[in-house]
């Protein structure tokens, strides 16, 4: 059966727009919730999208997790980049199947998970992180998402240099991205993309100044907001709470030096 749930798969047990549970399917596993327990093992052999009832008769839907779910449900230890920002990083950074991407810092691997999901099957992500404890958390999150095979985790300080060359993109989520700009220029192929994510405008200014001084062009800075809409006949309106400022994204392209 196409889309059949197998033992060892992860499912997203969806209750409502505010509550869902990522769980690994095991034959004898039971998920306990405030709405009763769900026998997870009973999902084996059924199709993703199936509706199941808890012991209290409350309906859950067993969805196949997507990239966004693995990002949101990743084991935390650091603040992760939101999917709204990840989507722009991937699209405007030109990241696609086959891309070779250098990333820093890994954190718990939320952005790494998304990058690896897009570069597979022939691409690779080289992810730098100075904290070994974060790398271990990231390794587990990447393995759970099924993309660890497309990532090389590196316990190194990227401000000291980049090992790789001729890469398609350098993506930075770190406190001092401007210190990496010269290394990124050397590592990128011509026209390759530089992307940095920073929470403060002071970091952005330093990064943009360094990009201009190091031969980058097509430099732009973006801030992305997302607002959900509550839809109900006669009562449709924006939700009271929204995801506002999370950070600034700087995008640039490597321009070759000299005129031919």
Image: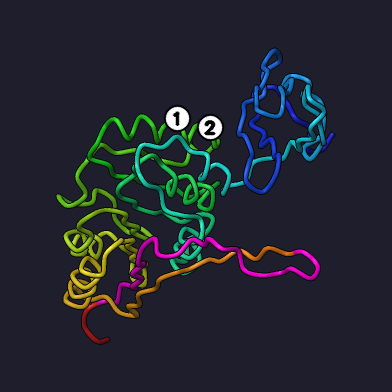
User: Few, some or many C-alpha atoms within 10 Å of disc 1 (few <14, some 14-19, many ≥20)?
Assistant: some
Residue 228 in picture, x, y percent from top left: 60, 63
- Dots 1, 2 in contact, CB < 8 A: yes
Q: Residue at x 26, y 70 (%)?
A: 201
Q: What residue is disc 2 on?
A: 144
Q: Quadrant of residue 32?
A: top right
What secondary structure characterizes most of the magenta part? loop
Looking at the image, residue 77 sits to the left or right of residue 64; the answer is left
Q: Nearer the viewer, residue 65 or 91?
A: 65
Q: Secondary structure at mark 2?
A: helix
Q: Nearer the viewer, residue 117 or 222?
A: 222
Q: Is residue 242 magenta?
A: yes
Residue 67 to residue 6: above or below:
below
Q: What residue is disc 1 on?
A: 140
Residue 219 in picture, x, y percent from top left: 32, 78
Looking at the image, residue 240 sits to the left or right of residue 57; the answer is left
Residue 192 to residue 121: above or below:
below
Q: Secondary structure at mark 1?
A: helix
Residue 148 to residue 249: above or below:
above
Q: Residue at x 77, y 64 (%)?
A: 232
Q: Please provide the residue range marked out in magenta.
A: 232-256
Looking at the image, residue 137 sits to the left or right of residue 41; the answer is left
Residue 152 to residue 193: above or below:
above
């Amino acid at each position: 059966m196409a889309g059949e749930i197998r033992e060892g798969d992860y499912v997203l047990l969806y209750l409502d727009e505010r509550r869902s549970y990522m769980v690994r399917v095991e034959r004898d596993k039971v998920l306990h919730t405030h709405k009763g327990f769900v026998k997870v093992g009973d999902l084996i052999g059924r199709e993703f999208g199936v509706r199941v009832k808890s012991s209290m008769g409350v309906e859950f839907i067993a969805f196949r997790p997507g990239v966004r779910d693995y990002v949101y449900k990743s084991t935390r230890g650091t603040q992760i980049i939101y999917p709204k920002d990840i989507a722009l990083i991937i699209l405007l950074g030109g990241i696609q199947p086959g891309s070779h991407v250098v990333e820093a810092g890994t954190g718990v691997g939320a952005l790494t998970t998304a990058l690896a999901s897009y570069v597979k099957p022939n691409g690779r992500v080289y992810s730098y992180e100075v904290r070994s404890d974060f790398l271990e958390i990231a390794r587990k999150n990447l393995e759970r998402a099924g993309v660890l095979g497309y990532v090389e985790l590196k316990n190194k300080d990227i401000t000291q240099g980049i090992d790789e060359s001729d890469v398609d993109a350098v993506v930075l989520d770190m406190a001092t991205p401007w210190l990496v700009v010269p290394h990124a220029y050397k590592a990128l192929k011509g026209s390759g993309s530089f992307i940095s994510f920073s929470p403060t405008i002071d970091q952005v200014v330093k990064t943009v100044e360094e990009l201009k001084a190091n031969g980058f062009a097509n430099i732009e800075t973006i801030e992305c907001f997302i607002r959900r809409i509550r839809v109900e006949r006669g009562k449709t309106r924006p939700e009271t709470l929204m995801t506002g400022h999370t950070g600034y994204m700087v995008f640039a392209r490597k321009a070759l030096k000299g005129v031919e």
